[in-house]
Amino acid sequence: MRIDKFLWYVRYFKTRSIATDEVKKNRVWVNDELAKPAKEVLVGDLVKVRKDQIIYTFEVLQMPKSRMGAKLVSLYIKDRTDKEQKDLLELRRSSQNYYRSKGEGRPTKRDRRDLDDFMTYFDEF
């Protein structure tokens, strides 16, 4: 099975075209060799994917017949990502939460209108 198709099947990428682009950008290795989109993946291969500045490593256990639900992915791949990479990912997630809590960001249109109404109220005085 092609590596781009396999990465899409096991839900590493949202679309197959994104998977193909990532392979073309030299962010995927199969058995420590850079892969091209048409590279064949076999059972037992070790695949490394650089995504979000983290290198994920997994072993191919089975070949899927089609794209599957997230709960079934563990039947087809076994995660072998280094602990250092997982710690780095956790550090980045926690540092993002430090600056801005989830749900806080740009104001919505309704928030902006409420703020404008509030400011015009004080401009009248």
Image (cartoon, rainbow, N blue to C red):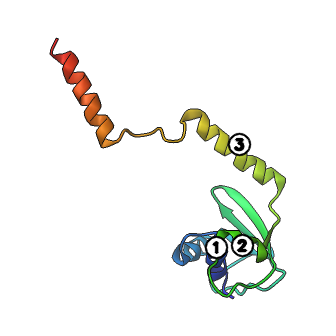
Q: Secondary structure at mark 3?
A: helix
Q: Identify the residue at image location x=55%, y=37%.
A: 101
To which quarter of the image does residue 19 belong?
bottom right
In-image side of 18 versus 76 (left or right): left
Number of numbered discs on residues: 3
Q: CA distance from mark 1 to mark 3?
A: 28 Å
| Mark nearer the N terminus (1 vs 3) | 1
Q: Residues within 10 Å of mark 1 (few under 14, many from 20)?
A: few
Q: CA distance from mark 1 to mark 2?
A: 7 Å
List the residue tagged with mark 3.
91
Does any portion of residue 114 appear in the rendered image?
A: yes
- Residue 58: x %, y % from top left: 78, 69
Q: Is residue 22 above or below residue 97?
A: below
Q: Amino acid at mark 3?
A: Leu
Separation of residues labelled 2 and 3 (CA atoms): 25 Å
Of circles 2 and 3, the one toward us is: 2
Q: Around disc 2, counting alpha carbons within 10 Å, would you say few (fewer than 14), some (14 to 19), or many (20 or more)?
A: some
Tell me where residue 56 appears, x and y as whole percent: 74, 63
Residue at which label 2 appears: 73
**Looking at the rendering, which quadrant does residue 34 occupy?**
bottom right
Secondary structure at badge 2 equals: helix
Q: Amino acid at mark 1?
A: Gly
